[in-house]
Amino acid sequence: MISVDRKKFILDCLQQNETVTTSALVQALHVTAMTVSRDLKQLEENGLLVRTHGGAMLPNYIVAETSYAKKKMRDTEVKRRIAGTALQQIRAGMTVFFDAGTTTFEIADRLKKAAPANITVVTNDLHIGVHLYSQPEIRTILLGGVVLPETGAVAGSMATEQLARYGIDLAFIGTAAITEDFFLVVPTESKCVFKRKLLAMSEVSILVADRSKFRKKKLYKAAHMSEMDRVITDYPFTKAEAKKAMPRGEIIAI
């Protein structure tokens, strides 16, 4: 395949998925990683994509909020593996917070099926609240406020103020993206403020994020990964990265 056709293929992939990995392109195009890297570099120079660690993304992907439906379809197998590991962290009698997101939804789904005794769930995710409320073994508290139509997340000052009323034993925290310096970043100020409050109110905080979230950008820095107690992920940390990201906390690799 000639260069022009390869680049068209890469851009088509990005239009469909918003991100793409070098390894996937190598397999699809039957070329070397060096060839793919060269194509990505030229496309970036023309302003058509932004290169990331191990791939590329659309330029507007760093600021846009992706719809819930698209998020739900991405990396489902990895999210379920993360969920299986995360479920092991929950004990009977806990008050557990589920941050809004599709990975946290998978954990909530596992919890519903496991039906542990005497669990209270607090969440700012409409999808999670609706999914759990009918499970009699789980007391479900849905925070109030404005529901964002793109994601079903509840955001705003009302949700943040209400969060302060609860003692959270364990919080599963998601994020829109994670920068190269391992900051958790989100697209809106209200989400940033909410996550800061959630960290302050939680006895134990666990970040759940698959590798597609890493080395990307959003507008607002909510926290540094080192502020988490644990992270559950399939991201392949190097020793240097692990020391920088989680100098005291635990990385649970799946």
Image (spheres, rainbow, N blue to C red):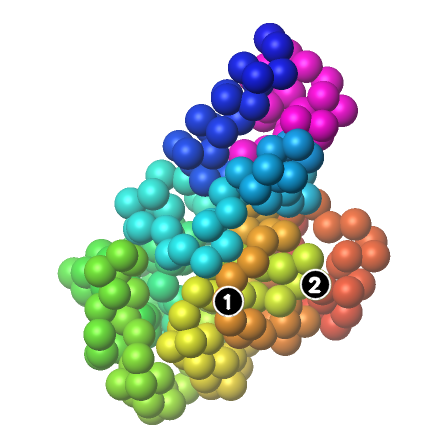
Q: Nearer the viewer, mark 2 or mark 1?
A: 1
- Under circle 1, the secondary element is loop
Look at 31% across and 74% down and name the residue there: 155
Write down the region rendered in magenta. Answer: 20-39
Q: Which residue is mark 2?
A: 181
Q: Is residue 15 above or below residue 81?
A: above
Q: Is residue 222 magenta?
A: no
Look at 31% across and 51% down and name the residue there: 68
- Does 184 sit left or right of 32 as displayed? left
Look at 46% across and 45% down and name the residue there: 79
Residue 182 image-quadrant placement:
bottom right
Q: Is residue 230 visible?
A: no
Rounded to the nearest angstrom, the CA distance separating label 2 from label 1 is 14 Å
How far across and down, in percent of the image, does residue 109 sit? 32, 52
First in sequence, mark 2 or 1: give its number. 2
How far across and down, in percent of the image, does residue 62 sit? 50, 54
Q: Is residue 32 magenta?
A: yes
Q: Mark number for residue 219? A: 1
Look at 50% across and 21% down and name the residue there: 9
- Under circle 2, the secondary element is loop
Q: For this rendering, which residue is in front, 164 or 152?
A: 152
